[in-house]
Amino acid sequence: MFYSVSETARAHLKTHFGLSEKCGSMFNPVVFPDVNSLLSSLIQMTPVRIIKQSNNREAHEYSFPGLDFTGFNGVGLRRDFPNAAIQTEIRNGFETEFIEVDSIIQTRFVTVIAEPKDTNFDIITVYPGKYAPAFPYAGMGKEEQLIAEKFWKDHILLRLNNAINLG
């Protein structure tokens, strides 16, 4: 698939490339040091799953079985961290909850959220890991909002305590 990335989207995507202070998923910098390196791989691939979203958006989930890992999955099940101190931060205009962890699990998946435009897709965001619904917001369809609310009730963002302990 062919994707294009606006300058606004590029600024947002920097939180997923390199070591970020923000919580959430991060790409393996050896495999995908920047968004351009990722896009050059995706142009030759077909998503393993496509999820239709509100506002004519689509989530494209890719698998990279030939790689050791594409990145670090910065989303975990809340029940796996019963004693963790929940913290909050503003992320993309939303107050989000996260916990600090000593290590983050590696993934071989990448998810692209994009809008179809003419012959390509405009990227909204991209992150390593399987599809995770957006944080609930007013513009979502009712069914999609219920799915997102349930997902984020059961899951939480992860932030690494110490960058040395990746994977």
Image: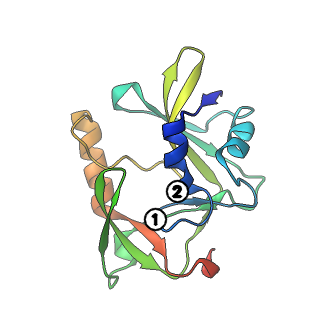
Q: Residues within 10 Å of mark 2 (few under 14, many from 20)?
A: some
Residue farthest to the bottom?
83
Q: Give x and y (percent) for residue 77.
A: 39, 68
Horizontally, is 86 left or right of 74 in the view?
left
Q: Which residue is mark 2?
A: 15
Quadrant into which the C terminus falls: bottom right
Can residue 107 be seen at all in this image of the molecule? no
Q: Dot 2 lies on which element?
A: helix
Quadrant into which the N terminus falls: top right
Q: Dot 1 lies on which element?
A: loop
Q: Give x and y (percent) for residue 112.
A: 54, 40
Q: Which residue is mark 1?
A: 22
Q: Which mark is residue 85?
A: none
Q: Residue at x 73, y 52 (%)?
A: 65
The kind of residue on which mark 1 rests is Lys
Horizontally, is 59 left or right of 89 in the view?
right
Q: Give x and y (percent) for residue 141.
A: 25, 33
Q: Residue at x 21, y 35 (%)?
A: 142
Question: Considering only order in the chain, which callout, 2 or 1, is on the residue closer to the N terminus?
Answer: 2
Q: Residue at x 55, y 14 (%)?
A: 118
The kind of residue on which mark 2 rests is Thr
* Label 1–label 2 contact, CB within 8 A: yes
Q: What's the distance in space between the residues labelled 1 and 2, CA to CA? A: 7 Å
Q: Give x and y (percent) for residue 30.
A: 75, 61
Can residue 138 be seen at all in this image of the molecule? yes
